[in-house]
Image (tube, rainbow, N blue to C red):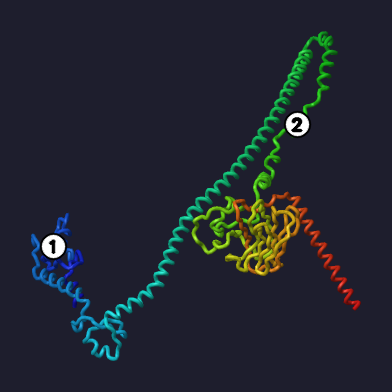
Amino acid sequence: MSVQLENDFTCSVCHDICRESVVLSCAHSFCKGCLKTWWNDKPVHECPVCKEVNSQPRPLYNLALKNLCETFLLERNRTARSDDFCSLHAEKFKLFCLDHQQPVCVVCLYSRTHTGHRFRPIVEAARDHRVLLQVFLKPLQEKLKLFEQAKENCDQTADHIKVQTQHTEKQIKEQFKKLHQFLQEEEEARITALREEEEQKSEEMKEKIEALSREISALSETVRVTEEELRAEDVSFLQKYKAAVKRVQQRLLMDDPQLVSGALIDEAKHLGNLNFNIWNKMKEVVCYSPVILDPNTAHPELILSEDLTSVRRGERQKLPENPDRIDRVIAVLGSEGFDSGTHSWDVEVGDNMLWFLGVAAKPLKRFEPRIWIISLCRGEYLAISPTELVSLSVKEKLQKIRVHLDWNQRQLSMSDCDTDEHIHTFTDICTEKLFPCISSGHKFPIKIVPEVNKSDDEKRDEENDKHQDDQVENDNNEDNDVNNQSHDDDN
């Protein structure tokens, strides 16, 4: 009934209880102020509900509705202040029903609704339930902190994404600028060569044309003089005949004009395999790194180079947390993992006096059994894996180390690039995907050595050598099989 009354007493314009109610000729009532606002700047005063034009020059006050609305507001305010009283018995709440989990009055205590229920005084129940709610609230507060921390990290991640995008875009533009510059220089060099050939051959052709012009002029003059002598009188003709024949015969002894070989522009030289030749030359100025470091896995105290091939120790950076970032071990992983085949890469440690390198499986935490490395720590070289910790005997200080991973054979070997001496081999690597792993403890950078671009002949020679080695190994295996078979036959 209270809800129905509230609907009846509600102004259709402001949707609140009517104040200073006025009634229109259509019997609809509204707040006086609301109706005045509704009719502002409207030529026709119509009802906001039924749109009927009001026939009265001025709306009349609805005194009955006004009194009812005021009474309703007073009653509603009184009821709002009576939350401490029972709505059934108009008695103050003094007890708390533990079974229904609600306040009750002393009359409710003896009602059928609460027969056999347990009760506590309001004060005790409130105290106990406050303690209980605080117990429930504590993990919720902790969860709220986790969500706030997660949101803060997401905000940092969003900002870092923008920084990464700007930095990466800048690097891309710089790399393409270098490539554009290289191509522009190549274009200018080849056009210059074309222009030089054009100038050279045009000059040669000009000299040839001038020589031919002189010979044509001389021949034309001889022909003209001879034709004049042919038209002379007989005596004059015969007197000059001998000289004329000699002059004509001399001209006949001249070499015939020859077409010049190689006079045209050598288009094949300039255009043949142009793209391939430029690409082949470009390989001499660019390099390939077999391992690219992943900045999203780098410990916050590690600083990577712009090309992501070297790393050094520096001040701790404020970076967003992500599941792949290594925070407990000062290390960085390669961007590409290996789960088959053989892979090799060279690492230049230089003068760094605290480092380790090798492979690791994700996730990488503080020296759990998922890392296979050699390290230099306090002047001692160590081999560290889940199953061993070995001190290594190294004759000379290591400067450049070759890492060779044979994933199929479960082996990881290290050797000195300068002396080609073997350092250590791990034979217990796991069957998971393995990532190159590097750590630098000093400001001196540790760098992945780029592969040298080899010519096609060198690559072909290496393939032939490998093929010969494989053939020799197969022959040895066949000989061993034959010997074993002969031994079995003798037995």
The circle on residue 163 is: none
Q: Is residue 445 left or right of residue 51?
A: right
C-alpha separation, residue under disc 1 versus residue under disc 2: 111 Å
Expressed as whole percent of the image width and height from the top left, the position of residue 460 reads: 76, 53
Question: Which picture quadrant has residue 37?
Answer: bottom left
How many other residues sit within 10 Å of disc 1, few (<14), some (14-19) or many (≥20)? some
Residue position marked by numbered label 2 in the rendering: 260
Q: Secondary structure at mark 2?
A: loop
Q: Nearer the viewer, residue 317 or 432?
A: 317
Select label 1 or label 2 by which is in front: 1
Expressed as whole percent of the image width and height from the top left, the position of residue 134 reads: 36, 74
Kind of residue sitting beneath label 2? Val
Q: Is residue 147 above or below residue 248?
A: below
Q: Nearer the viewer, residue 416 or 403?
A: 416
What residue lies at 29% left-to-right and 80% top-to-bottom? 124
Q: Are marks 1 and 2 in contact (CB under 8 Å)?
A: no
Q: Is residue 180 above or below residue 75?
A: above
Q: Is residue 351 above or below residue 117?
A: above
Question: Which picture quadrant has residue 325?
Answer: bottom right
Task: Quadrant for the C terminus, please.
Answer: bottom right
Task: Quadrant for the N terminus, please.
Answer: bottom left
Q: Is residue 147 left or right of residue 128?
A: right
Q: Is residue 81 left or right of residue 174?
A: left
Expressed as whole percent of the image width and height from the top left, the position of residue 478 reads: 84, 68
Q: Is residue 436 above or below residue 91?
A: above
What residue lies at 79% left-to-right and 59% top-to-bottom? 467
Say which label, 1 or 2, has the lower sequence index: 1
What residue lies at 37% left-to-right and 73% top-to-bottom? 137
Q: Secondary structure at mark 1?
A: helix
Residue position marked by numbered label 1 in the rendering: 32
